[in-house]
Amino acid sequence: MAAKGRTELEVGADGVAVITICNPPVNSLSIDVLYSLKESYEEALRRSDVKAIVVTGKGGKFSGGFDISSFGDVQGGQTTQPKVGYISIDILTDTLEAATKPSVAAIDGLALGGGLEVAMACHARIATPMAQLGLPELQLGIIPGFGGTQRLPRLVGLTKSLEMMLLSKPIKGGEAHELGLVDALVSPNDLVNTARQWALDIYELRKPWIKSLYKTDKLEPLGEAREILKFARAQAQKQAANLHHPLVCIDVVEEGIVAGPRAGLWKEATAFQDLLFSDTCKSLVHVFFSQRATSKIPGATDLGLMPRKISKVAILGGGLMGSGIATAMILSNYPVILKEVNEKFLNAGIDRIKANLQSRVRKGKMTDERYEKAMSLVTGVLDYEHFKDVDLVIEAVIENVKLKQQIFSDLEKYCPSHCVLATNTSTIDLNLIGEKTKSQDRIVGAHFFSPAHVMPLLEIVRTQRTSPQVVVDLLDVGKKIKKTPIVVGNCTGFAVNRMFFPYTQSALFFVDLGMDVYKIDRACTKFGMPMGPFRLADLVGFGVAVATGMQYLENFPERVYKSMLLPLMMEDNRAGEATQKGFYKYEGKRKATPDPEIMKYIEKSRGMAGVTPDPELLKLSEKDIVEMVFFPVINEACRVLDEGIAVKASDLDIASIFGMGFPPYRGGVMYWADSIGAKYIHGKLQEWTKRYGGFFKPCSYLAERSAKGIPLSAPVKKVQARL
């Protein structure tokens, strides 16, 4: 097999060997690259014309870290991996750091994960101001495995190193220099020459020869260190109670401080090995690749089309969604025209944008100067006169079919013929919205999730008439405004909302049958959701929940549970967080507290539904509750796949994580379903159908895959109906 990447060795007249990591696009450290690095080092150490060594990366990037694509091969047993500790101890510690000739890392672009660990094993580090340095391994369910848990605390101190590792937080060259992680900052043009000179200065004893593994001046005294570690453990458990690997990372750091760095390296190597085969790591690696695959769309991105330049964007509606979308656009330097129907609404919309940006300034994420520049990109208007030269319009008005139809007729008149006409509707069929226009090839859904400038998902909805060029244009805009886009077909609720409508519905159903509201929410948050279905209904507002519920009732009457609970509560102006009362009470800073008053509404709702509480349901464990709430979601996700609304199961995984907050360490809704097995899910849904009725009836896709033992996420073998 051809080698996957290599290093190149070049010896200059000054006696410095420059070893360059070559594995485009980010010089990732495949096993081949690491073996080649060892060979290049050994050659440099053997050669009498070499006094010192510089390690750098080709094409302005040091190294983006270990090659993640090889994880799957290792986990699946297709690749034999080196023995435990071979990379961190034999290569980086006993070959690079213990070398008899000094080495300097010349860092530009990325030095992440294994890339930074290679740099830390050198005797000094020179970087450019914009270089990014970090150890983000915990995002993949593992810990730094090439000595990072031992060297980083010794270079920057315990508190900062734990923050960088536990939060997967990279830092720029400037901060790395202040912290002592790098020894000097230079421009990219001077980088390698400065590193060469620095390496010679170490060789000639003009600069210190430092092995970072044995540095102790940055480490806190043992008692203090133990307090910091104790605090970090408490924080890790609070932030992610279901995750084990952050605690393992802290244990490994502690081992190095208490028992010495060599013992720490061995503990790190064995812990890394165990975590590599954990379910969490497999799930997070799946998410990593699924996220990158969302932008590959058959019938669009495979046609060789180039995205057209979008220079100016118009947004209709300055409400919560419109102002959020405008904020996302100006943060990525798109000039925005914001249109409203009157001065009062327009001012309110602009004030919302200001508030969104000011919150970033307060948090230190934005300078005052950057704030002024962003606000200067917004122009407020009350008519369509300014729409003559816009390239993209996003309509974000209320969910009213007639109003949207009127708007799209107007847009067709006022916008140039190349302009992309997008709607932010969350449920309405796009064919209905564009019914009265001749521009159906330009009409596309750009469904953002609230708050639009924060939530990472963008659902791009195409009809059978939407041109592939428009899809490619919108994918490009999505990438530029730092969203993860998924392209889906056109139907009520599209992919995300349609897949998750049973989340609240099944919860309402079980409350009518005697289950406790707060127990359901608790079970869902313990499972890893940011909030349970009732807290979510409060946040969204009952008005929206009832309106979207009606859409589903109209389109999928056989599998909608029509609870009277929300309408009953709305009669008393209990409509969620906005009215300070919903399923919870809200006082002060959005803090939700359970409210015993809701029992009277629940009893009334049960009376109207003519049901009596089922005593069996009151005995359910949290695991059972999670299954009863989520299996109907899986069932609907299967229909979405079967109908060709989603291109592939992994897109639904990403949609569930980025759109609904499904825990990423479970791999997304379809991946999690396959970890449980179609047979088990199908059996449970059948059992509940017999007991509780058609709401739970398993769809044919699920039934078929259960019978044949095929994973739910295996590709659908038929022509995609909707796309």
Image (cartoon, rainbow, N blue to C red):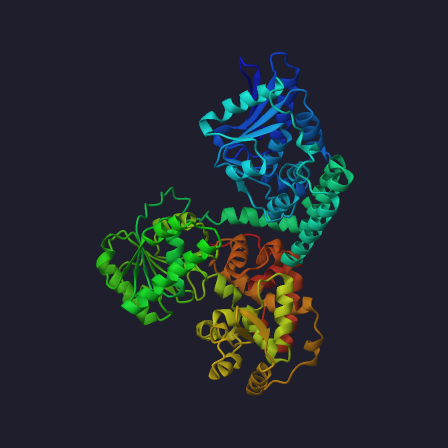
Residue at the image position 55 percent from the left and 55 percent from the top: 653
The percent coordinates of residue 240 (x first, y second) are 64, 56
Q: Does residue 58 sit above or below 393 in this rendering? A: above
The percent coordinates of residue 675 (x first, y second) are 65, 56
Residue in the foreground of this view, choosing between 86 and 363: 363
The percent coordinates of residue 330 (x first, y second) are 37, 52
Q: Quadrant of the C terminus?
A: bottom left
Q: Quadrant of the N terminus?
A: top right
Q: Does residue 548 sit above or below 195 in this rendering? A: below
State left or right for residue 62 relative to residue 330. Answer: right
Tell me where residue 52 sits by quadrant: top right
The percent coordinates of residue 528 (x first, y second) are 62, 61
Residue in the foreground of this view, choosing between 722 and 609: 609
Residue in the foreground of this view, choosing between 69 and 88: 88
Tell me where residue 203 sits by quadrant: top right
Tell me where residue 308 sits by quadrant: top left
Residue at the far right: name it.
259
State left or right for residue 141 relative to residue 132. Answer: right
Q: Does residue 316 sit above or below 579 in this rendering? A: above
Residue at the image position 21 percent from the left and 59 percent from the top: 385
Judge whether residue 280 can be spotted in this image: yes
Judge whether residue 489 can be spotted in this image: no
Q: Does residue 233 sit above or below 29 in this rendering? A: below
Residue at the image position 68 percent from the left and 66 percent from the top: 623
